[in-house]
Image (cartoon, rainbow, N blue to C red):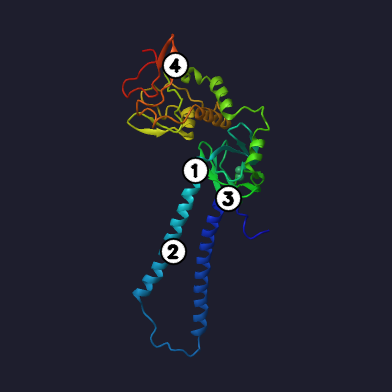
Amino acid sequence: MSFFPQGASTLAGKVDVLFLFVLAVCVFFSLLICGSIIYFSIKYREGHEVDRAKPPSGSPLLELTWSGIPLLISIGIFGWAALLYVNEYQAPADAMQIYVVGKQWMWKLQHPSGRREINNLHVPLGRPVKLLLTSQDVIHSFFVPAFRIKQDALPGRYTSLWFQPTQLGQFHLFCAEYCGTNHSFMGGWITVMRPADYQRWLHEDERKPSMAAAGEKLFLSYGCSGCHGLNSRVQAPPLEGVYGHQVPLDKKQFVVADDAYIRDSILLPEAQIVAGYRPIMPSYKGRISEDELLQIIEYIKSLGTTGAGPAGTSENSRVPVAVQNGEEVKRNLFPAAGKASSPKQ
Ligand code: CUA
């Protein structure tokens, strides 16, 4: 039993310094206030001879001081903590992504390579890892004390957090949100490995297709390719290079095509219609599982994220080319607002 949990991520030290600072402020003021109470109780106790002639009746300077100093300290703590918080939820661009689905009562994790785990997560040492979390039933919370990270996994939403391990070894993973009977058993281990060992571990199970490959299969089997495929005759926005880019919606609004947007487009397709397209896509709500959604997202991601500038805003954007009736048809990712072009023009 140790007083402090191990610190095994780049965030741990920073959180500890803040925690110790807050603790020091509390201890200092507790001692100051308790000490003063005891000192004055003894000095001015009944029957003790002291000078009680001129009790102080007010001092603006004193009052400003005892309001001003705590104000500055609390604003300082707020700013410091806010910086750490913002940092904890904004993963670096080169972070590797791992998908997490919470369910009563286990954590299901999947690596983009396709390898799956339950209640265990293997990660390489020294690399930033971003987790994308969701839940398929109730609210759970992904908590790794040694990394000083905690994030809720919410049904119907994606949340994320990131960490960079600084120590090899195994670290406890908990569910930190009461989620039913076996909540206390919903936990496991994070195993931090040497990068080479991690690569070996990742490819031990070669039979598993990568998440993107599994997603492509689903893309075909759910019939998505019938409309979004390059050779489809139905007019639907093509998905090549869309991930991570701005998508124009009607009414001159834009939205970034991130994980949450793709998820919403599959489950609530009428909520955000791409400019120039008709709301003809059926909802897949209730027909597709959380794991499958993540695989499809990984597939769409694999179709490319690097276009020239935000997609659809310049002539240089990636414009997929389809072959139809022997002719090359340029499929404009985003038909000019107003005139919806048909692939058969
Ligand atoms: Cu899941 Cu508590």
Q: Secondary structure at mark 2?
A: helix
Q: Secondary structure at mark 1?
A: loop
The verdict on label 2 being within 8 Å of ligand 1 is no
Residue 92's disc number: 1
Is 202 situated above or below 88? above
Q: How much space separates mark 3 and mark 4, taking CA atoms?
A: 47 Å
Q: Secondary structure at mark 4?
A: strand
Q: Mark 3 = which residue?
A: 9
**Amino acid type shown at disc 3:** Ser
Q: Mark 4 = which residue?
A: 322
Crowd rating for badge 4 (residues with CA inside 10 Å; few <14, some 14–19, many 20+): some
Residue 3 image point, x, y percent: 63, 60
Q: How much space separates mark 4 and mark 1, taking CA atoms?
A: 35 Å
Is there any visible trace of residue 134 in the rendered image? no
Image quadrant containing the N terminus: bottom right
Residue 65 image point, x, y percent: 38, 71
The verdict on label 4 being within 8 Å of ligand 1 is no
Q: Nearer the viewer, residue 311 or 64?
A: 311
User: Which badge, 1 or 3, is on the more N-terminal residue?
Assistant: 3
Q: Mark 2 = which residue?
A: 73
Please indicate whether residue 189 sits to the left or right of residue 262 in the image: right
Q: How much space separates mark 2 and mark 1, taking CA atoms?
A: 30 Å
Image quadrant containing the C terminus: top left
Is 301 situated above or below 11? above
Which residue shows up at 49% across the image and 17% down it?
A: 226
User: Which badge, 4 or 1, is on the more N-terminal residue?
Assistant: 1
Report the residue that reaches farthest toward the front.
Answer: 196
Is 246 situated above or below 331? below
Residue 63 image point, x, y percent: 37, 72
**Amino acid type shown at disc 1:** Pro
* Mark 2 or mark 1, whichever is nearer to me: 1
